[in-house]
Amino acid sequence: MLENFNPYSSQNTSQNSSQTSSSSTPPKEVNLEGKSYKCPSCGSYLLFRKGRLVCDYCNYQTPLHYHPHPVEYTPFVHYPVAEEKVNVKCPSCGATSPLPERGIAMRCPYCKAPLLGEFFNPLKPPVMVPFSLSPQEAYQKGVEFLKSGFFVYGSFKKELQKYKEVTSYYYPMWLFNLNCYVEYSGERGEVRYEYIERNGKMERYERVEWYPVRGSLDLKFRNIGYIGYFNRRSDQIYLSRMQWNLAKSVQFQWEPLAGSEGYEYKIDNSTALKIVQGSLEGRIRNAIRRDIGGDRQRIWEYTKEWFDIQNGYLLVPVFHFSVKWRGKEYNVYINGDTGEVTGQKPINKVLVFFVVLIVAILIGVGIYYYNQYMGGNGGGW
Ligand SMILES: [Zn+2]
Ligand SMILES: [Zn+2]
């Protein structure tokens, strides 16, 4: 049914020649006819909402059909980032607007119509995780997160009432499966206890005996994700903490992007791989310590060799909501599939200080009375 108004059914090869531009030439500007899905009943545009395309004007709705498809891993090869600057013409109001860097979908800044672009990177996302939350549900979760907690300012909670909307994003995510062969040398410490008599009392002393060790490990890391796009460092930090249900991935299709902002990768997979490998250093050291065993471990040195690196690529759904308050911006991110919320909120430090102070005073008073009435000799504190 969707084929009737699928904007991609018509051949669109005019831009293909620009995809092969090398990095030595300045970035090309490409002008695209932006596409959106037309409502067959009133001619307005359709928006994606929770598994359907809907028309806000006449309430026309049509369900989408997904094709479940697992994330596919292929042996790692480097994929560069395209350089084209892309402008899209809105089919509703005719205005031309630049897409953000490596953007593939946005709302028209003038008439809010959803605009869909094209992929320019050499690798297109084969799969995506669609939104299962509606913007209203995401908004509720975001507000609950920001309001919860005793230490959040009352005036911040009030300011929140002015914000009624969340923006939906599709972010590109790299996934890696990696194996690592590690050879290490170090020492295993065994704790021995000795009892020595001092002033007529037996006292326990701890002594560590160190034994040199060498070993090797075959480590396997699976489904390690990295968002291949961010405008701000905070986005990356918060988004990389999110858990994704990869079992829900479906074949990529354009319809779920209608009304969202969407991006293809802006950070190439070689850069992402280096960052991911660096972030696994702690896990490698922990594995070495576990392998050394004993009560204490010392790592002298280790070498590592990465092999069998596999790469996957997909789009993941995120709702974002930011509140400006007292000159600062507080960002909240809601996983568009699982509803998991993460982000920042202002904590009333003065209130925290007083609560800590009061608790400290109460403990102090308690100790005083304990010593006065229960402590006997009173000198213990
Ligand atoms: Zn309509
Ligand atoms: Zn427009």
Image (cartoon, grey):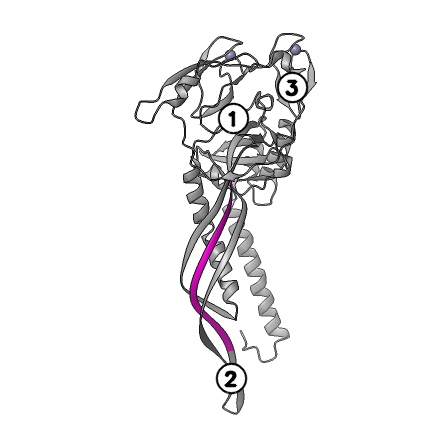
46 shown above or below 137: above
- Mark on residue 379? none
Q: Which residue is mark 3?
A: 53
Where in the figure is residue 135, as x and y percent of width and height? 62, 27
Q: Are marks 2 and 1 in contact (CB under 8 Å)?
A: no
Where in the figure is residue 343, as x and y percent of width and height? 53, 39
Is disc 3 placed on a helix, strand or loop?
A: strand
User: What residue range appears in magenta?
Assistant: 175-191
Between label 2 and label 3, give the one nearer the viewer: 3
- Mark on residue 262? 1
Front position in the image: 93 or 309: 309
Q: Residue at x 57, y 31 (%)?
A: 127
Q: Are marks 1 and 3 in contact (CB under 8 Å)?
A: no
Category of crowding for the residue at label 2, using alpha-carbon neighbours closer than 10 angstroms: few (below 14), some (14–19), many (at least 20): few
Report the side of 169 relative to 67 (left or right). left
The residues bearing labels 1 and 3 have C-alpha atoms spaced at a distance of: 17 Å
Front position in the image: 252 or 98: 252
Q: Which residue is mark 2?
A: 194
Magenta stretch prevailing secondary structure:
strand
The residues bearing labels 2 and 3 have C-alpha atoms spaced at a distance of: 75 Å
Q: Residue at x 52, y 68 (%)?
A: 293
Quarter of the image where the N terminus is located: top right
Report the side of 103 relative to 363 (left or right). left
Is disc 1 placed on a helix, strand or loop?
A: strand
- Quick check: can you spot residue 245? no
Query: Which image quadrant is residue 182 in?
Result: bottom left
Q: Earlier in the sequence, mark 2 or mark 1?
A: 2
Is disc 2 placed on a helix, strand or loop?
A: strand
Q: Amino acid at mark 3?
A: Leu
